Image (cartoon, coloured by chain):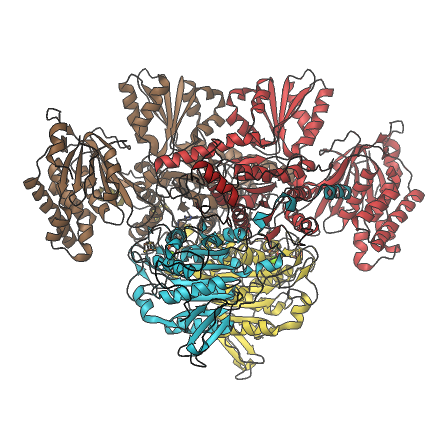
Chain colours: A red, B brown, C cyan, D yellow
Amino acid sequence: MPNISKPNEHQVEQTQPPIINDFCITFCTVNGSGSATANSTLLRSIFKMGVPVSGKNIFPSNIQGLPTWYSLRVSRDGFLGRVEKDDIVVAVNPTTIVKDLDYLVEGGVVFYADDISLPLTRDDLVYYPMPIKRLAKEANLPSNLRDYLANMVYVGVLAQILGIDLEKIKQSLDFHFKGKLSAVQMNFNLVATAANWAKDNLEKKDRYFIQPMDATKGYILADGNTAGAIGAIYGGVQFSAWYPITPASSLAESLNELVSELRIDPKTGKQTCAVVQAEDELAAIGMATGAGWAGLRSMTSTSGPGLSLMAEYLGLGYFAEIPVVVWDVQRVGPSTGLPTRTAQSDLTFANFISHGDTNFVILLPASVNECFEMGWRAFDIAERLQSPVLVLSDLDLGMNQWMTPKFEYPDQPMDRGKILWEDDLQKLLDRSGGKWGRYLDVDGDGITYRTVMGNKHKASAYFTRGTGHDEYAHYSEDADVWKHNLERIARKFETIKAYTPKPALSQMENATIGIISYGSSDPAVEESRVLLATHGIPTDYLRIKSLPFHSEVGDFLRTHERVYVIENNQVGQMMQLLTLNFCKEVTKLRKVAETTGLALSATWIYREISGMEA
Amino acid sequence: MPNISKPNEHQVEQTQPPIINDFCITFCTVNGSGSATANSTLLRSIFKMGVPVSGKNIFPSNIQGLPTWYSLRVSRDGFLGRVEKDDIVVAVNPTTIVKDLDYLVEGGVVFYADDISLPLTRDDLVYYPMPIKRLAKEANLPSNLRDYLANMVYVGVLAQILGIDLEKIKQSLDFHFKGKLSAVQMNFNLVATAANWAKDNLEKKDRYFIQPMDATKGYILADGNTAGAIGAIYGGVQFSAWYPITPASSLAESLNELVSELRIDPKTGKQTCAVVQAEDELAAIGMATGAGWAGLRSMTSTSGPGLSLMAEYLGLGYFAEIPVVVWDVQRVGPSTGLPTRTAQSDLTFANFISHGDTNFVILLPASVNECFEMGWRAFDIAERLQSPVLVLSDLDLGMNQWMTPKFEYPDQPMDRGKILWEDDLQKLLDRSGGKWGRYLDVDGDGITYRTVMGNKHKASAYFTRGTGHDEYAHYSEDADVWKHNLERIARKFETIKAYTPKPALSQMENATIGIISYGSSDPAVEESRVLLATHGIPTDYLRIKSLPFHSEVGDFLRTHERVYVIENNQVGQMMQLLTLNFCKEVTKLRKVAETTGLALSATWIYREISGMEA
Amino acid sequence: MVDTAVQGKSQINTAGLTRAEYRGAPSTLCQGCGHNSIANQIIAACYEMNIVPEKVAKFSGIGCSSKSPTYFLTRSFGFNGLHGRMPSLALGAMFGDITVKGVGVSGDGDSASIGLGQFKHMVRRNIPFVYIVENNGVYGLTKGQFSATAQKGLSLKKQGTNPYLPVDICMEALIANATFVARSFAGDPKQVKELIKAAFSHNGIAVLDIISPCVTFNNQEGTIHSYSWAKEHETPLHEISYVPPRDEIMIDDFVEGTVREVELHDGSMVILKKLETDYDPTDRWQAIKVLEEGQANNWLVTGLLYVDPEFPTIYDNYNLPDEPLNRLQEHQLRPSRESLEKINQMMW
Amino acid sequence: MVDTAVQGKSQINTAGLTRAEYRGAPSTLCQGCGHNSIANQIIAACYEMNIVPEKVAKFSGIGCSSKSPTYFLTRSFGFNGLHGRMPSLALGAMFGDITVKGVGVSGDGDSASIGLGQFKHMVRRNIPFVYIVENNGVYGLTKGQFSATAQKGLSLKKQGTNPYLPVDICMEALIANATFVARSFAGDPKQVKELIKAAFSHNGIAVLDIISPCVTFNNQEGTIHSYSWAKEHETPLHEISYVPPRDEIMIDDFVEGTVREVELHDGSMVILKKLETDYDPTDRWQAIKVLEEGQANNWLVTGLLYVDPEFPTIYDNYNLPDEPLNRLQEHQLRPSRESLEKINQMMW
Ligand SMILES: Cc1ncc(C[n+]2csc(CCOP(=O)(O)OP(=O)(O)O)c2C)c(N)n1
Ligand SMILES: Cc1ncc(C[n+]2csc(CCOP(=O)(O)OP(=O)(O)O)c2C)c(N)n1
Ligand code: SF4
Ligand code: SF4
Ligand SMILES: [Mg+2]
Ligand SMILES: [Mg+2]
């Protein structure tokens, strides 16, 4: 084991300036060991100090005992993307320490459990031992909790060395344990003990510091799955069917919990939303489709393998024109892939899903806040369009804690689309001389009027089917009827562009090149643009928020010399869709895509683009 | 009922020249009434007379009692595509007769059951009554067969009036009833009686004639599904799992029958192929994948809805690298669509099927002969590539009888790909110093060596999975391992282009424009090119036979001013894939696509192209 | 006797409707197909029960059987879904308005082959729903391949011989804890009708396995899905009559001790006239036994095999409002602005 | 007594292998997980049966349970397939070489929720295959949601209370005409091992429903998937021992009349020592009954519930060659040139 003071002495030059609120700490532990509480406590505490933070959990696809990493990024500039190198490593897992240290920057810091034998690979680092076992033991904790609580030792040590406010840590614990005093106290005592131990026994030799700021006002800390669920609640979701799958489960689970908090009618005391755990994804989409057909705001949430199982039903939804919202919280595919890693690789599949000529609106939230917003907006779009709407989130967005602007109450009343109840139908019949057909395009926008099950008007009923049908929903194998029906349905996807979120444009002075990206790659893109600009490459940036594309995308392509399309998959799937739709501009497009299971980093994007621009 | 001689008198000008071997007869009947035997007997008889023919069955999605049409095209030039107008209508179904007559050309001919009251819509036609009921009654047939046999009356009448050789009809009946004398006799007697009746009672007033030719030598009559099954048999298929679905069922059913004829080992008397009817398509592809993994030449056959259900397993096949052949005999989608009508609309779905980054070889047979060829070749490609291979046929090709060049024995020995049995593995280990990994790219072509279940070599076993794995098939969540593995797999799809069928080029002198098409649209395209050329528009034609595209496609695009992409779907799916792959040439591409449930016709293509060229 | 609806064909029932108003589009099935008889009994049952057609929703999968919802109750909403996946579709839809009665028509291929999983899971959830399987042992619509209920040893011209034992829909339902399980035969219209009525009154999943011969592909003499075999071997457990709620039962219509009565959740009664033995349809174990016995003895056991009128339904887990869910409006569905502010405060 | 394999841990069995050579990769499951015990018994059974690992193929779906095939028999081919779809994968694969023994490990979510249909259809086809369900009542790998076998009324912290009756894997298998059905408990390793041996010798589908507690998510005292409940309520039908073929049974090891013997297809014997009652495992009806009784009385009935050693298997429909199908070569697979010429002549 290397001497602690030794590497420090000849490596860290004391003359280097301190690094304040701009570094990344990675906690290297094993899963199922309770480190999640410790890590999120630190995240919250720093956030409470007004300092921008984000946390990424890199965990294995099992339940207990394998290596897990948690990267906590502190960024005074508010950058939230993944970084490639760690500044500080908290080493609690002996099996990975060699590799873990490899990721440290020159002169980085290691907090390590003192029962680990340190490798001799790096002598440029600052090493701090932590007597985790001893302090935990001395704390006299209940034996069944000791191992979990032990993690509070590193919370205390880090707090002391980096300058994290113990009061904020207490508040965070209070939040985490929902005010349960005994738990808060037990944890906090150990934090305080450890902090004291560090104060007495460790000398600060690194240059990393947390200092209070005022940069988190108006922001909250949340994960995208919870945000999506809250969004759905405020979108008036009435039915959700789902099947467990990582990383989507927590969306439905949150929804289920939230229903009993937020969706009990104060007048009747009754529940206005039903969540059903189905037997698989085929059943989940079937149930959600049925509910959407019956006039409920209906949804399901899944990940890639589940989406594959939904292919047949989505085609029915497209063709029978049934509103339903499908969240795909993407993980790494193909196949079972890396179930606990992130990717944006279901895009083309989602776009072309189901046999026959189909089309789908796809929403692409890029932040937790947008998960909330699209959570409610998706229902308006689905009911307006009368078709399935897919929301493509991913593990990084969905399961990690992000700092995000607080949720804003929907700025529009619900759009229930062209639905007719008894009186509406009567009025329409009066107007039209008794003519109404489920698939009759009265308004010329491709979208027809629908009644739903339970409507008591004698003319309201019709028979829905996935087979050929005419404007009055009667079975038909007629060639013209088929063709015209399909053409009308295609027209709906033009109409809907007035309702779907337009791309977000962000410009820089003198920019001649552009970037197109979407979803969870956004934070890395934003940060890379600053890097690029610093190096003399200003960029404009168009973030796609939905498909089908709006005309603004074409304008953007036309007005830039080169456009880099940045995404987290292998083949460049957004690039493919852009090529398809804006083929004339294709010579301008440059693919910047890779898939490794991790979120993209700004530095990687920077290297890719500056390399091609060089 | 109009007088028979009347319309004839003032419409058909006797001075018009006869039309020989170049017209279309449509038989308008109801399904389940036994007309299929009559129609195919006529088809075969004319074919036997050396005259090119093709037959298209337009049938409803039910079992009995609804209108059905059978169009028999006689074409001395060998054109086999659908025509838009009928020359002759055989009207046996009173419920459709008005519409049926609408489709007749000016001066066309109607053979009608004399108990139908003829509509008065067309007085330009030649009408021949047929005493179907009476002759059938007088023939003293078994009462349970009478209605079926009655159709032989129109066979006889047409034979007499058009000049079809009764001897050939007898041969055809003999073929149909597999030599069962009583059946042949009973049917033929009625044919002869009806022919005699016509000779005695009808005067020839139309100008349509069948005359013997010598244009069917080297050709056979077959449907694509049977051909695909025969192809598979000669490809050494060892396992097929399937689930009934129109229009794919007959492929598996033929295969099942053929196994007992062709795949009983003469030495052992044992069966060398197993066909399993699965409980659904999810199970069918699962079984086929398992068998492919275990080293069998394995396949499944389905149509659109079934393909949708196979999405998840196909992703596993791609990623775990398992050879399996999937036939999709396309019908009209989306959803259940028109189950008994034809389309080419599963192409983009097939191309992008399954979540995550995937890719698939897709074979596109354009003729019955090619169904046979791709039937065997698909296994060579699948085992070479170690990945699922999709074969996209369709209802028109699969279920209709076509004149096609006779099947040619495979010109290559089977390519079992990189499979290692005990000795092979030992040799490889000896060569490599004991190093062998299931996913280790020894040859640099992306394709790795595999052993299969049952291999007794101690080093042969490995564990296959849809999750991340390294070169030795060990579980891995490592970012680099993931990325490199996916890159290697992608490389296989470059390698395989040397094995997949290249596009077929057909040129005309002075052509500056090109046509790209594929699959069952080919006959209509070929005919339209003659039409276009006649009107001063010579064309070159590249027929795509497989995906991924070969470089020849790019060459073709580059060397033509405009390229029309012709296909039977709504959005122009091949056009989309071309756009994606050859985006630089996209301004040249013109979409010529529609979907109505019917095969494309040469005249429609001609109108579309000449319209755009005008 | 217990038929309380009006008698004449053109007469108006208490819902103010004629029998014709319960009809559907003309059938496109084969003449003689068992499915047609069943559709007719659904029409008759609904007419006689005075059901308002708008208060019924129809569902089906894909198959000849699954086509039949178009052939009854034109004035009801209907959804012809995907092959084998009707159960999930219907379950989701029923949440839209739980005052609507749901009826599903499926086939043996649809429910026992591709759809076995969804069928069983729907049953397990005990959603109030009439689930009719029109069981003919083959895939009619795809031209006669063996389904999972096909008889072992059955030989069909194009198909060869079926080597597997059949799936028994009723047994599957019982094992999945169905709360209403009946078997009948399309050739026994009276029984079919009374069972359908009882099923409509049942507050839970009601599974009706009805042998419904496919005259085109599977009606060979002596095989278990044929008219002739079913007629010969039908062994009714009882003579069943349905008495609607609020109707006085003339108990002296029955000789004391010769009937069993089961009261359903809505107050209606099922009157079971004893035949050879005294069968108790509230004893699940007896139901399983009688099915085993039937199998051993080549009986087609028909009648109400099992009913538990009071088992909790799926809705009991959800505290749903009285007002149909699909009629709730924005103010009932979107929580207040203040509540979101509270959430924001909780999120850090 | 009937354990014929070598005793010492490092000793070599008649296949020339040590016990270690039957091991797999180190388990990544939770400490104490029932699945680990079962994997160990598979190792022990194969070692003691002298099975050559290359003559075994392992399959699974997705779940903690489905991970376990990596934790035994490294020298066997294995395939970790898709969630709920192992049965089809395995069925297809087994045709590759029917001399190889197939063993599948699945979970209750994998086989009773998403996979119920495939499970039942595989069983129905009676393919020779050892089908182990490691039953813990929850989805372990996705963190503890209720599966379809979860106890009714079970309350879990994050999940609330399960309102549905559990699917009974053994009952499902019996109703689907499984030819070998057993239930056991991961905490009864001796029984698990003997049952696995018998299952490997059975010529048909062998379903083993093994209660295998999830210590992380569903091991509460008093609930049916917990170690404590299972231990307390285990009610073995008999004491089971497996005697390999060609082994002499010392019949005088047993007191006359205290054992039942069942001879399996390969000549091996299952010796069932009677406990309280004399249970006949060849009577399917008794098996169904004992399950019902067990349910009513809160017994965890374990042991060999049912076996029919001679029922035809799926292979009997196929007249397959003795040589494994996957070793056939081109000349055995591609018919002659002449035969194609004949076909061409037939095609007009
Ligand atoms: C996913 C899918 N696979 C296959 C089919 C084709 N298909 C249509 S109906 C049917 C079987 C119907 O059998 P059954 O449910 O018994 O109904 P029946 O026609 O016998 O009344 C099949 C396999 C389909 N429509 N969808
Ligand atoms: C199609 C699909 N849906 C969902 C999942 C997510 N998933 C993985 S394991 C699992 C459940 C496993 O439960 P069980 O079979 O009981 O195994 P256990 O972990 O309890 O041993 C689920 C739902 C998946 N992998 N694939
Ligand atoms: S094919 Fe059979 S099931 Fe279908 S309609 Fe005809 S008789 Fe009925
Ligand atoms: S989570 Fe449960 S089932 Fe999974 S490994 Fe842990 S104890 Fe076993
Ligand atoms: Mg059927
Ligand atoms: Mg489980």
Q: Name the image quarter holding the C terminus of chain A.
A: top right
In front here: B417 or A423?
Answer: A423
Q: Residue furthest right?
A: A200
Instruction: Indicate the position of residue B258 as horizontal and vertical percent values.
Output: 30, 50
Q: Quadrant of residue D35?
A: bottom right
Q: Is residue A89 left or right of residue C105?
A: right
> Residue sitting at 41 percent across and 46 percent down?
B299
Residue A307 drawn above or below residue C94:
above
Residue B532 drawn above or below residue D206:
above
In front here: D241 or B280?
Answer: B280
Q: Is residue D60 visible?
A: yes
Residue B527 drawn above or below residue A266:
above
Instruction: Indicate the position of residue B138 as horizontal and vertical percent values.
Output: 10, 52
Q: Is residue D321 visible?
A: no
Residue B295 drawn above or below residue B78:
below
Image quarter for ligand 3? bottom left
In front here: C166 or C128?
Answer: C128
Q: Is residue A201 left or right of residue B583?
A: right
Instruction: Indicate the position of residue A155 as horizontal and vertical percent values.
Output: 83, 45
Instruction: Indicate the position of residue C256 as horizontal and vertical percent values.
Output: 45, 81
Q: Residue furthest bottom?
A: D256
Q: Residue furthest left?
A: B200
